[in-house]
Amino acid sequence: MIDHIHRGDKRNERTMPGLAGTSLGHYRLKERLGWGGMSEVYLAYDEQMQREVAIKMVSSTHAEYIERFHREAEAISKLHHAHILPALDYGEQEPWHYLVMPHIENGTLREQLMRGPLTLEEAGALLEQIAGALQFAHNQGIIHRDIKPSNILMRDDHYVYLADFGLAKSLEGGSTITQTGNLLGTPEYMAPELADGPATTSSDLYALGILLYQMVTGELPFSGETPIAVYWKQLRDLPKPPSKVNPAIPRAIEYVILRILDKKPQHRFQTANELAEAYIHALTFPDQVVEEKEEHVVFPSLYSTTSMNGDAAEQATATPIVPLQDERLVLP
């Protein structure tokens, strides 16, 4: 939710001057916590309930982001789960639309991972919580579409919330916020099939697999100097085996991680709960690999230029990407 943490930079004064101390209804704004894209997140005091809250705000002048705001509020209203950050209130006060959420003081998983990888047991505990939240969302017909560490909020070292449903999509086929011909997301966590297909529960699971890889190794499987370079690797390259990064990772856990990162969606685990259960089983029996009849992971990507249609191949090789401020990208 918060991709950038305020550290006294001038941008705070330039983008939203004088908001600290002002009010939105019965919420008194105290300080800016961070920003992502066109949205800002403020620490506020709820004078009615006498508690601190976080308020996500976007100006009504940004129509696309207002649509995301409405989508996020609609998605969260359907999702009552212990590990999904709830919405407390939603409203408008010109020129702002705002979404009120609990204030989680201990930061994000992104900040935690900047200090190094988690233990295999710690990763398993967090995976169960995130997977449970994601499974619940999928069961309600909601695809998150932006699973990444900065959207995992830490209540403490052992309890997390899945947050930021601003890119969420209904499985029922409702309208999407992605412009025609554009691909919106965070390239380090985007599944290969998104290059020429819609977001699905499997693309969410792929992103969760990237997050799991990152939790146990401290590194991303794919990185690059530009967003297109990163996503091109998602399309073409196999991930480095996790045990090559962290030798403490046993064979069974490595198999689970590489399977969820298979380029072919049908070869991945099919639900978030299935992934979490496989990881916990591998953690309990680290030398036991439960393989199915069909091989996984070892295949090169299906999404090479030869397997894309002509337009998609040309787009992947020649079209520049316009990155957004919140680390997502758009392929025009």
Image (tube, rainbow, N blue to C red):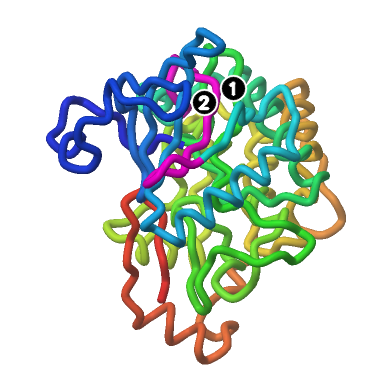
Please say if 298 is above or below 9: below
Residue nearest the observer in this picture, 245 or 330: 330
Residue lying farthest to the bottom in this orientation = 310
Q: Quadrant of residue 82?
A: top right
Q: Quadrant of residue 164?
A: top right
Position of residue 239 measured from the top left corner of the image (x, y, whole percent): 51, 52
Q: In the rendered structure, which disc, 2 or 1, sits on the residue that comes first in sequence?
A: 2
Which residues, given as a range, are shown in magenta?
92-109
Q: Position of residue 210 (x, y in %)?
A: 55, 44
Dot 2 crowding, Cα within 10 Å, few <14, some 14–19, many 20+: many
Q: Amino acid at mark 2?
A: Leu
Q: Is residue 264 above or below residue 164?
A: below
**Residue 10 inside the magenta-drawn segment:** no
Q: Which mark is residue 160?
A: 1
From this view, report whether residue 285 is shown above or below residue 45: below
Label pair 2/1, CB-CB below 8 angstroms = yes
27 or 134, nearer to the observer = 27
Residue 104 lies within the magenta run = yes
Cα gap from disc 2 to disc 1, whole angstroms = 5 Å
Q: Where residue 197 sits: x, y (%)?
A: 63, 72
Q: Which mark is residue 286?
A: none
Q: Could you tell me which residue is drawn at 46 percent across and 37 percent down?
A: 1
Residue 153's mark? 2
Residue 296 in view of the camera: no
